Amino acid sequence: MSLLSSRALQLDLGPHGLQLARAGQVLHASAQVLALQALPAALDALPPAATPRRAALSVGIDNAWVRWQVIDIPPAVSGREERAALVRARMAEVFGSAAQGWAVAWDDRPASTVLACALDAGVLQHLQAWTTARGLRLQSVQPAWLRGYAALRGDAALGGYAELSHGWLCLGLWSGGRWLHVRGEAMSDPAGLATVLERRLAAFDGDLDGGRLFLRGMPAVSLPRGWQCVAGADR
């Protein structure tokens, strides 16, 4: 088990560069601006010695490269194919024709709403080609926000989780175990979080006062409607 753990790799990448680590130790990092078309060259530049064959690789995708939607599922929609068509249609309605070239994933458990995310399919294609060439096992590809939320230690019937990284805010809200909203947007000043939260709460009916907002990558700020900040949420 210790041998497997020591070979497990974590690759984090996005528009601000990439970082390869093992057991929390950084093996290689590049902080240059990384466009999608430059991703193959950036991956090839990773030292082969840092990516031993058959090593398991988990990939974290920067939030700025991911798009989100909470999608209502009508009772008449059944089966994975119908859900897939609906999710893709909703993505296209919100984000336009660009969504046609995206890879889409969603929570497929039976529910009246699903949380769906999407990113350019080219990112996955480049990763799959590179890991095959290096002989790596691509274990998972996960948005940074979702990885942070999955590790969140917080209990709130009405709450949210927000990450701010490189000037990009990703904020998700839930109530009574049901997702209300997840969205990313540019935000340079953490103080602007209060305005963002108020704007998003105003889009929903019902009593949404007095929630708890778990934060990562920003200090606590004063929030509207009696919401409480919980800063320092870690993965």
Image: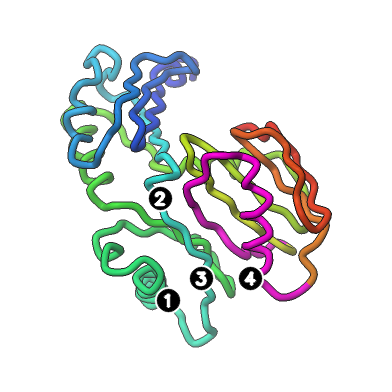
User: Which one is earlier in the sequence, the residue at label 1 or at label 2?
Assistant: 2
Residue marked by disc 2? 66
Per the rendering, the mark at residue 79 is 1
User: Which one is earlier in the sequence, the residue at label 2 or at label 3?
Assistant: 2
Distance in Å between CA atoms under marks 3 and 4: 15 Å
Hey, what amino acid is under mark 4?
Answer: Ala
Hey, what amino acid is under mark 2?
Answer: Val
The quarter holding residue 101 reads: bottom left
Q: Are marks 3 and 4 in contact (CB under 8 Å)?
A: no
Q: Nearer the viewer, mark 3 or mark 4?
A: 4
Q: Nearer the viewer, mark 2 or mark 3?
A: 2
User: Which one is earlier in the sequence, the residue at label 1 or at label 3?
Assistant: 3
Mark 2 secondary-structure assignment: loop
Give the residue displayed 37% in from the left and 37% down from the top. Answer: 139
Per the rendering, the mark at residue 203 is 4
Hey, what amino acid is under mark 1?
Answer: Gly
Dot 4, crowdedness within 10 Å: few (<14), some or many (≥20)? few
Q: Position of residue 16 (x, y in %)?
A: 36, 32
The quarter holding residue 4 reads: top left
Q: Front-most of 166 and 207?
A: 166
Q: Front-most of 110 and 130?
A: 130
Per the rendering, the mark at residue 71 is 3
Q: Are marks 1 and 3 in contact (CB under 8 Å)?
A: no
What are the residue bounds of the magenta stretch?
177-206
Give the residue displayed 62% in from the left and 46% down from the top. Answer: 192
